[in-house]
Image: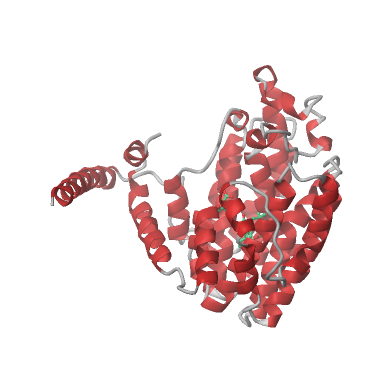
Amino acid sequence: MGSLGAIVKHPDDLYPLLKLKMAARHAEKQIPSEPHWGFCYSMLHKVSRSFALVIQQLDTDLRNAVCIFYLVLRALDTVEDDTSIATEVKVPILKAFHRHIYDRDWHFSCGTKEYKVLMGQFHLVSTAFLELAKNYQEAIEDITDRMGAGMAKFICKEVETIDDYDEYCHYVAGLVGLGLSKLFHASGKENLAADSLSNSMGLFLQKTNIIRDYLEDINEIPKSRMFWPRQIWSKYVNKLEDLKYEENSVKAVQCLNDMVTNALMHAEDCLKYMSDLRDDSIFRFCAIPQIMAIGTLAICYNNVEVFRGVVKMRRGLTAKVIDRTKTIADVYGAFFDFASMLESKVDKNDPNATKTLSRLVAIQKTCRESGLLNKRKSYILRKENGYGSTLIIILVLLFSIMFAYSSATRHSN
Ligand code: D9A
């Protein structure tokens, strides 16, 4: 849908969208002038627009450490992902990557598009890394070491069991949670979180991505990437790719719902992790991706479109999440809303209906027991105010006319 169409349909997205646009502009103006830091932040903007915005919340020191951590992980990912590198070459690079980050002369060309630039200019990331405080460097090194070893282990191993799935997700995402918890602790702003809770923060995000990206991963050229565990999909089809064929729609959706139910298992750990955070900026940085994840699960659940194309939260809803996530009450509210939306989508005939419903009830119970519900605006369940919408549509039209007029006059000068 075109952006104007989306706004007419969801007029109250407009204000958060405009606010997000302004924030993005502001963030891009803030890119540091030293060449290595300038490179790192503009790279961050290129590889992940929304992450680059969310990271702006953090104080300079911690923000720099998180920025470098993110780019180091992306570089490691680029090596793992590049199917044109032979296994004998790839495995040693993954295993030694934690040493390469200290070496300004180390260099390895791979990846495509912006990732190729990241790899080509990796010495600039190393230079910035070497300027971080020692405790930040050590946290990043430790996680890079463990993640590289874990990725190497999975190069020749498929995700068969649910335990394999949890182990793989631990390496590529759970460790990110552990690493960030270490960085937060090193900044002096937070207590050190329990590893199992930090791990769940990563697993919840990663499993959501794996569910949402089914089609993109299976259609990957030259070779499909398969992250859905055989132990789950084999209950429904003979081959993972069979899920995308129309004749298997019923089985495919049941399998999808099984995967979503598995991911929901981590939601309560995530709520616990977030409720323990004390610093407002760290809190927002952690909470925004988590709300997006449960929102994404809610729109993917029971939705055959996951096997046909991209299912994503609309930009306006993302903007709303970024705008409205301020306190833990907002997080409980959002989790409660999305759990209710999921509950309303559960079909009694789904083979996992009972299990799914019991997970959802547990999430809702945790949110209710916080005693913080009903103190916020809802994202989805609120009836839109007719007058507000009409007023906003009129404003959009007015702004469009003014914008068109001002750019026309600017060009004629
Ligand atoms: C994160 Cl340093 C990620 N991953 C994310 C983004 O959030 C987590 C990668 C590197 C870092 C951080 C994240 C944020 C805050 C707290 C966290 C945390 O833990 C305490 O990680 C667990 O997805 C990637 C992994 C899931 C593999 C960890 C959020 C992000 N979102 C994408 C949106 C999308 O659709 O993928 O990157 C984006 O902004 O482009």
Q: Position of residue 10 (x, y in %)?
A: 36, 42
The vertical placement of 264 against 284, above or below, is above
Observer-nearest residue: 68 or 177? Answer: 68
The vertical placement of 113 against 182, above or below, is above
- The structure residue drawn at horizontal position 61% and vertical position 28%, both measured from the top left corner, is 304
- The structure residue drawn at horizontal position 38% and vertical position 44%, both measured from the top left corner, is 383
Q: Position of residue 412 (x, y in %)?
A: 13, 48
Give the left or right position of residue 255, taking residue 149 as reference.
left
Q: Position of residue 49 (x, y in %)?
A: 49, 55
Give the left or right position of residue 4, taking residue 219 as reference.
left
Observer-nearest residue: 333 or 205? Answer: 205
Q: Position of residue 339 (x, y in %)?
A: 59, 47
Number of marks in the rendered image: 0
Give the left or right position of residue 111, taking residue 157 as reference.
left
- The structure residue drawn at horizontal position 46% and vertical position 62%, both measured from the top left corner, is 375
| Structure colour scheme | secondary structure
Give the residue at the far front of this rendering.
105
- The structure residue drawn at horizontal position 86% and vertical position 44%, both measured from the top left corner, is 156
- Residue 194 in view here: no
Q: Based on the displayed image, in which of its 4 quarters is residue 162 positioned? A: top right
Q: Quadrant of ligand 1?
A: bottom right
Observer-nearest residue: 236 or 160? Answer: 160
Quarter of the picture containing the N terminus is top left
- Residue 253 in view here: yes
The vertical placement of 22 against 382, above or below, is below
Give the residue at the far top of this rendering.
247
